[in-house]
Image (cartoon, helix red, strand yellow):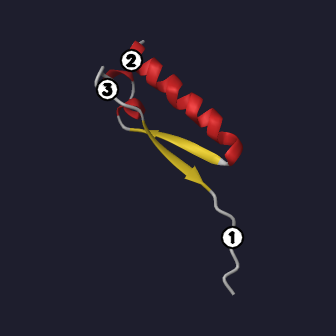
Amino acid sequence: MNNKYTKRRLIAEDIAEKLAPMGVDIVIVGSVAYGPDSVTTESDVDLVGICSFPSTNMS
């Protein structure tokens, strides 16, 4: 397994775990999402946070 991939994947999972109690889901995008063969020493960790905001009554 690509150690660079594994390290970045663990970082993403740690961030997702820390944000989960706040109702935020994390999607991994970029080279890490493509898999171990796409990750190099120059790769960063690209994440998209998805959260739900409560409905507001504007009336």
| Residue 20 relative to residue 4: left or right | right
Q: Which mark is residue 38?
A: 3
Residue position for label 2: 4
The image shows residue 1 at horizontal and vertical percentages of 42, 12
Residue position for label 1: 55
Q: Residue at left 41%, top 13%? A: 3
Q: Quadrant of residue 31?
A: top left
Choose the circle earlier in sequence order: 3 or 2. 2
Q: Nearer the viewer, residue 36 or 44?
A: 44
Farthest-out residue, bottom: 59
Nearest-to-viewer mark from 3 and 2: 2
Mark 2–mark 1 Cα distance, whole angstroms, equals: 41 Å
Q: Residue at left 68%, top 74%? A: 56
Choose the circle earlier in sequence order: 1 or 3. 3
Mark 3–mark 2 Cα distance, whole angstroms, equals: 10 Å
Say which element carries label 3: helix
| Residue 17 relative to residue 33: left or right | right
Q: Residues within 10 Å of mark 3 (few under 14, many from 20)?
A: some
Q: Amino acid at mark 1?
A: Ser
Choose the circle earlier in sequence order: 2 or 1. 2
Q: Residue at left 46%, top 19%? A: 7
| Residue 37 relative to residue 12: left or right | left
Q: Amino acid at mark 2?
A: Lys
Q: Nearer the viewer, residue 9 or 57?
A: 57
The quadrant in which the C terminus is found is bottom right
Say which element carries label 1: loop
Residue 13 vs 46, above or below: the answer is: above
Q: Residues within 10 Å of mark 1 (few under 14, many from 20)?
A: few
Q: Amino acid at mark 3?
A: Ser
Mark 1–mark 3 Cα distance, whole angstroms, equals: 40 Å
Residue 23 vs 37, above or below: the answer is: below
